[in-house]
Image: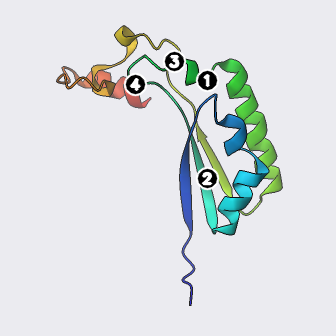
């Protein structure tokens, strides 16, 4: 006997996978598995290197449009989207708390800025 447990999934969205992860085929697979919540997280490069996969304004608008379509089509699934927080991906613009270099965090201000 199956338990009635709601579950969801999170998807990191890039320029490369945007159209695939908002497609009806992808959502139908998740729905068949019983997924009730889809959390889309916009890719933000932590190291400032892979900036070509980060969204620009046209991708953000397309994502918003596709989410509205999905919400209208799949009434039994909750779709949530978190937009990226940075447009300047140069290493100097990234808070120390987000860097993968192993440096110590020097101020709480950096981590607060990161989660806004």
Q: Secondary structure at mark 2?
A: strand
Mark 1 element type: loop
Q: CA distance from mark 2 to mark 3?
A: 24 Å
Please say which color scheme the image uses: rainbow
Q: Disc 1 versus disc 4: distance between alpha carbons?
A: 14 Å
Looking at the rendered structure, which numbered label has been put on residue 46? 4
Do residues under tags 1 and 4 come within 8 Å of each other at their CB atoms? no
Q: Nearer the viewer, mark 1 or mark 3?
A: 3
Task: Determine the secondary structure under disc 3.
Answer: helix
| Label drawn at residue 71 | none
The Cα atoms of the two marked residues, 4 and 3, are separated by: 9 Å
**Element class at badge 4:** loop
**Total marks drawn?**
4
Looking at marks 1 and 4 on the same chain, the residue that comes earlier in the sequence is marked by 4
Left or right: where 69 falls relative to 103: right
Q: Which mark is residue 38?
A: 2
Tell me the crowding category of disc 1: few under 14, some 14 to 19, or many 20 or more residues within 10 angstroms, Cα based. Answer: many
- Tag 1 or tag 2, which sits nearer the N-term? 2
What is the distance, in whole Å, between disc 4 and disc 2 at their CAs? 23 Å
Distance from disc 2 to disc 1, alpha carbons, whole Å, reads: 19 Å
**Residue at screen point 37% across, 17% down:** 94
Position above or below: 78 against 57: below
Residue depth check, mark 4 versus mark 2: number of the one nearer the observer:
4
Expressed as whole percent of the image width and height from the top left, the position of residue 79 reads 66, 50
Within 10 Å of disc 2 (Cα), the crowding (few <14, some 14-19, many 20+) is some
x, y percent for residue 110: 30, 22
Please name the residue that numbered disc 1 is placed on. 55
């Amino acid at each position: 006997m199956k338990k009635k447990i709601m579950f969801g999934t999170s998807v990191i969205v890039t320029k490369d996978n945007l159209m695939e992860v908002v497609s009806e085929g992808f959502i139908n697979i998740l729905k068949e598995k019983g997924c009730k919540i889809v959390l889309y997280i916009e890719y933000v490069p932590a190291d400032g290197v892979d900036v070509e996969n980060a969204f620009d304004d046209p991708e953000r608008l397309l994502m918003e449009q596709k989410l509205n379509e999905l919400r209208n089509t799949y009434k039994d699934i909750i779709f949530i989207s978190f937009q990226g927080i940075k447009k300047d991906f140069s290493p100097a613009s990234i808070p120390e708390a987000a860097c993968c270099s192993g440096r110590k965090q020097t101020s709480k201000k950096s981590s607060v800025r990161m989660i806004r």
